[in-house]
Image (cartoon, rainbow, N blue to C red):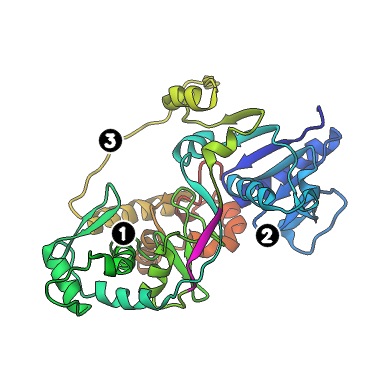
Amino acid sequence: LDGKGSHLITPNDYLAKRDTQWMGQIYHALGLSVGCIQHDEAFVYDPEYVNEDERLQRLRPVERTEAYGCDITYGTNNEFGFDYLRDNMAPDLRYCVQRALHYAIVDEVDNILIDEARTPLIISGPGDESVDRYAQFSQIVRQLRNERHYEVDLKRRTVSLNEDGIDKVEQLLEIPEGESIYDDRYQDFTHYLEQALKAQALFHRDKDYIIEDGEVVIVDEFTGRKMLGRRYSEGLHQAIEAKENVRVQRENVTEATITFQNYFRLYDKLAGMTGTAETEDEEFHMIYGLDVVVIPTHQEMVRDDQADQVFKTELGKFGAVVREIKDMHEHGRPVLVGTTSIEKSELLSEMLMRDGVPHSVLNAKQHEREAEIVTDAGLPGMVTIATNMAGRGT
């Protein structure tokens, strides 16, 4: 109302677009303008605009500056953060798209401000380092074996060679006897080796990334969505490209970076909503100066939380899940199954197909059908398998 604009941050582009269409009708009736920022496009809510794409009804394409000039602007934390970095790199104010950061309302605020607080947003440019070494060291690490040549610490996300591993690598690199790969003259080798080991042991296809159109595309661990245009730093992305036998692109050099924590602290006013904030009460107050207010339920909780079932093997667990899904489906009840990765969602899908259970799969590979899948998910007998793309907001 004071004309400085409000940013409404949602967990993903789908929700930003959907909420602009839903809430835009109310805001427009109240005389407020509404914009929406997406990965490579921007819109304003216009009730008279007709779009050939049913998913974009009443959303008129505009420049990002116009979307940011609206009274209310919807978008994801990634888009707001990257636009801030690009504005700071702009040579002239004419090229900036954002206004001053006045007020932000964050959906699923604990996920963005606490869980992803230290996640860096990085804008980088191409470096001039050769990419040939990545393919060479990818071939080398394929000949190494876990526990025999190296140890993996999943908690710290590190991989370290043991003595047998060092000897094996030095043998494959034909390093002269009496010299070590850790000598100063071979310091470049250790960089390529470390990244190749990480790519081999810590990063997995259809979990941490997917291959699309011959490129490695990162999958966000929090949202389960493709992070288009994002690349791992310090040569890790190149090591994964070499591992997957796709074209290895040049390593990038960081030009601008900021964490979500530091970005959101730039706003004059900050607020948010979530169903799970009370446990982070102290962190919200210490880091952001925010107080947590618990809103009691309108009616007494009647949900029946049953005991967990534990299985000896993953196959046994999935077999029980399939039996439960079939039973629910036969009784005409809609079922939503949450999985931890694309790989797991596809495994469960294959098992359901073998048992003749019709279903839909929502993961980063099917993001174009998201609106259709979500719309149908509540229909009688519908079975939907989803990664964390289908968050609480969806």
Q: Which segment is the magenta one?
A: 249-255
Real-space Cα separation, disc 2 to disc 1, in angstroms: 30 Å
Three-letter amino acid code at disc 1? Leu
Q: Is residue 123 magenta?
A: no
State if disc 1 and disc 2 touch (CB < 8 Å): no
| Residue that numbered label 1 is attached to | 202
Mark 3: secondary structure: loop
* Disc on res. 307: 3
Real-space Cα separation, disc 1 to disc 3, in angstroms: 32 Å
On the image, the x and y values in percent for residue 14 come to 62, 51
Which is more N-terminal, label 3 or label 2?
A: 2
Mark 1: secondary structure: loop
Viewer-proximal residue among 374 and 68: 68
Q: Quick check: 63 above or below 347? A: above
Viewer-proximal residue among 108 and 358: 108
Which is more N-terminal, label 1 or label 2?
A: 2
Three-letter amino acid code at disc 3? Ala
Three-letter amino acid code at disc 2? Asp
Q: Nearer the viewer, mark 1 or mark 3?
A: 1
Residue 171 in sight from this viewpoint: yes
